[in-house]
Image (tube, coloured by chain):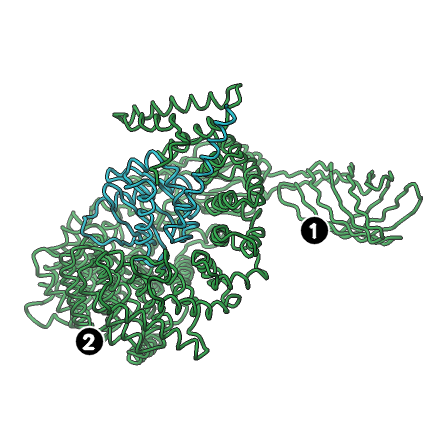
Chain colours: A cyan, B green
Amino acid sequence: MQFMLLFSRQGKLRLQKWYVPLSDKERKKISRDLVQTILARKPKMCSFLEWRDLKIVYKRYASLYFCCAVEDQDNELITLEIIHRYVELLDKYFGSVCELDIIFNFEKAYFILDEFLLGGEAQETSKKNVLKAIEQADLLQEVHSVLLQFSAL
Amino acid sequence: MPAVSKGDGMRGLAVFISDIRNCKSKEAEIKRINKELANIRSKFKGDKALDGYSKKKYVCKLLFIFLLGHDIDFGHMEAVNLLSSNKYTEKQIGYLFISVLVNSNSDLIRLINNAIKNDLASRNPTFMNLALHCIANVGSREMAEAFASEIPRILVAGDTMDSVKQSAALCLLRLNRTSPDLVPMGEWTARVVHLLNDQHLGVVTAATSLITTLAQKNPDDFKTSVSLAVARLSRIVTSASIDLQDYTYYFVAAPWLSVKLLRLLQCYPPPEDAALRSRLTECLETILNKAQEPPKSKKVQHSNAKNAVLFEAIALIIHHDSEPTLLVRACNQLGQFLQHRETNLRYLALESMCTLASSEFSHEAVKTHMETVINALKTERDVSVRQRAVDLLYAMCDRSNAKQIVAEMLSYLETADYSIREEIVLKVAILAEKYAVDYTWYVDTILNLIRIAGDYVSEEVWYRVIQIVINRDDVQGYAAKTVFEALQAPACHENLVKVGGYILGEFGNLIAGDSRSSPLVQFNLLHSKFHLCSVPTRALLLSAYIKFINLFPEVKATIQDVLRSDSQLRNADVELQQRAVEYLRLSCIASTDILATVLEEMPPFPERESSILAKLKKKKGPGKLPDMDDSRRSVNGNTEHSENTDTTNKSSTHSFTDVLNLNSAPSSGANLLIDVFSESSASPAATEVSEENFPRFVCKNNGVIYENQLLQIGLKSEYRQNLGRMYVFYGNKTSTQFLSFSSSVSSSDALKSQLNIHPKAVDPVIEGGAQMQQILNIECVSDFSDAPVLNIQFRCVRVRVCARSPLCVCVCVCVRACVRARVCVRACARAHLCVCVCVCVCVCVCARVRAHVCVRACARVRALTSVCVCVCVCACVCARVCVCARVCVRACVCVCVCVCVCVCARSPLTVCVCVCVCVCVCSHVQVWWGPAEHRCEAPRDAQQVLPAHRDDVAGLLPALEAARSVSTAFTDQYADRWSIIALIENISASDFER
């Protein structure tokens, strides 16, 4: 996978993850072009399209579009399910996720993505394992805040 | 789980985000952001040390601002500080900031690497994972340098936690993608392969990706992975779906891992071991069987995951291309998908079948689905699906179904989306040519193409149709008849006019017998389109008219009248005007024999790869186009093959050798051009210097006319009626001044009355490397044939003082605490071009007095700038042997500082660094006087057509013949060759006016 973008129906980018080195300028151009292309497509159209020399796989969940760019050799359907699994992860973590969760807790969205995908490849496909890792991290932080309270006392 | 623990509650951040969301306008948002940036900047700069929490909060805000699309130019240092925090969340935010906003800021990268190193060494798996994620996300070269050897160790160490192994595997994959040269192969590779056997499926998933990437580059090193992958795959596909627990996804067992394993297997040919091979075949069959089973769930996720594995299995079957039964089964399966209600599946089936069509085993099976695909072309609502259908039709096309497929594509073209029209046009053109049994069909198809989608027919397409018609005698008459009929349409596309003009100009005589297409009718038909066309087409039509004069003497008068009309002879466009004038002249003065020779039918084109195919390949990108030639030779290769040999024979009979290749054509053309000139030139001797650049100005108004070591003369000129202005640029190529520079224009007595030239005065000095401009105002009083001569004089003095004595004193201090003085006398011989070999004898006096003699050879290269870098290796024969390499930079005035490291073979090994300053005095003064005089000639402007009294015809004929022979050299240049001939004729004609 070369990159993943999340954007709203209004074309606002909510999350971007790049697995190939590109300059800021290129990134902005790519996201602008791609968001336009995808928003122009009708709902019943197929989820895959050729774009430049990449394959784009996208899916819309409520007001958010999830869009992945994969190489020519990559499997489109499994990429579609990568998107779905990520949505499931977000949903489970935030408890019926909505766009606002991702806006206000964008850092969490990134952390979950990092546990699930790394370097553009699926790292851990088990939902339990990913969430366990995130939970542990959250626990660590709570321990810290508890310790802080103690030291304050 | 509690929705987001609020423990870290960065309230400030949440408030800021809501503020941004509440902004009514873009301006308000920018204002709010700028306010926040100023606030953060002042906090970071403030005297009070920030606590970790505030730092984290501000860094997080910066990150948010960056993700909104604004530039962030500070805060990196604070983020790096967070990396070394003990608190997990602070560290985490620090890493996130670095991963998102990294730039190779050299002083920070070291700090970041240090923090990462600490975390990798911490043995705390959560911290290690954070560090590995950061490396994988950034993946920069600096990080690869720092960690590429460390990560394999973590990956294969026995005590590494599973989650860390997963991160390490993918981290290594990323580094291998960005800087493969830095990832060392080694004994760890064998152990990585065995991760395929790991109990933890997450580890296997990550490791499979890594192995696939590595195996693509070094397949031999990872051969053992094949058997392991097959075993693993077999266990997965035969497992009950419940066995794999959380790795089962909507009743499909480990779909991601299965897909990855199948990808890995695609790096290798089918396994040679029979048992392994049958096991793999069994797996693939099981996957194909499962596709037929009723779905275990109605959820789309279930079918997607199942079909993802299926498509990957089919990709492997196609890759192996060895099991006919599997290939045919795959094809049938895809055939079912072609009519599936899911658009996604139809799309993928079409795409996948495209590759299947290129296999000899399944090509026929694919062809059975032609009707469905054609139907898809007509009914699909999504353009990207229709595009796939077009691709598949193109791939499945062969001699047996070409007519039908081309017809379907043509009819689709009428309604096709604008975005894909050009590609379809190219495809139709290629198929029509490739599978044409009789060329009448080909001609019909291309004319239809132009009629339906004329705007999308690129030049290559109509060039090609003309090439083919010219090369095939049997189709010429038909082509002439067809274009004639097509041109009858009241509105026809300009491309059709071009093809029509060309073909009727060449072969109009073949249909002239019929009274309905008599010469006059043909001419009137073409001329009725003339005024609606663009300039290039009109130019082509003018050429067709002159060809008509040759073909049909009876319409000569009519055509001459047209050429003579004001709208032609005084056309505003110089090209059209020129053609009209030249052609009219040619038709008046040349006898029928000469006309017949000059305007003879075009010789056949040399055969080569269709330019359309090249264009399609370029459009699609290399490798994307199924290469039909190679893969389907056994299906229909024979017939095509014989056709090829046939055409090469044909072209060789016309003696088209390599000389006429595209590459060499311009040069041979240029030579011939010069021949034309020298033959006709009145005073060839006077123009020796500039003759070779002279022809350039026939077609251009600017360029370089003269150049040597010292000087470059460029020209730029513009003309209006009989007035011209020429800018002459003198470029000094040396680094020294040109002194007493002067230029003058001299003309012969006869010329003086015909041409007035007023050069503006020039500055007598041109600085080194500078350029000076001189303006010449030119007025043409009457026709002229001689060329004026531009004389240039200047002086160029180059003095070089090389202060370098044969005696140099150098003092060197060496690390071995012994101070030694060394006097060395050296003699050196050096050639002018500065590769010098110097032999030096040096006597060195040191605390222990000892003399040694050393011989050294050094090669040095000196750039023009006279800073020289010399590397010298010297071996000195003395009590010890030492080799020293030195690099020294020396400026022209010769103070040289050199650092030399010498390793001496006397044990204990000592390295001594000595800095020696040597001042040398010497002189040889070189004075170099520039050549006294350069002569070069101001160009005759051949392009301008002066109102002419062209009566002098003597000598025209041989020149025209020469021009004709030149023109054959240009025949390689596609179709519109007449323009070149016209140009050459024009040159010769205007030259002959002398």
Q: Is B346 on the left or on the right of B791, as rendered?
A: left
Q: Which chain carries label 1?
A: B
Q: Is B543 on the left or on the right of B86, as rendered?
A: left
Vertical placement of residue A108 versus B283, above or below: above
Quarter of the image containing the N terminus of chain B? top left
Which residue is farthest right? Answer: B849
Q: Nearer the viewer, residue B552 or B38?
A: B38
Q: Is A39 on the left or on the right of B848, as rendered?
A: left
Q: Are marks 2 and 1 on the same chain?
A: yes
Q: In which quarter of the image is residue B420?
A: bottom left
Q: Nearer the viewer, residue B67 or B290?
A: B290
From where the camera sits, is residue A44 visible? yes
Q: Do the residues labelled 2 and 1 touch (CB within 8 Å)?
A: no
Disc 2 is placed on an element classified as loop
- Tell me residue B471's x, y (percent): 26, 72
At x 36%, y 45%, the residue is: B701
* Circle number at residue B835: 1
Disc 1 is placed on an element classified as loop
Q: Which of A91 and B811 is in front in this view?
A: A91
Which residue is farthest top? Answer: B47
Vertical placement of residue B135 versus B480, above or below: above
Residue pointed to by mark 2: B438
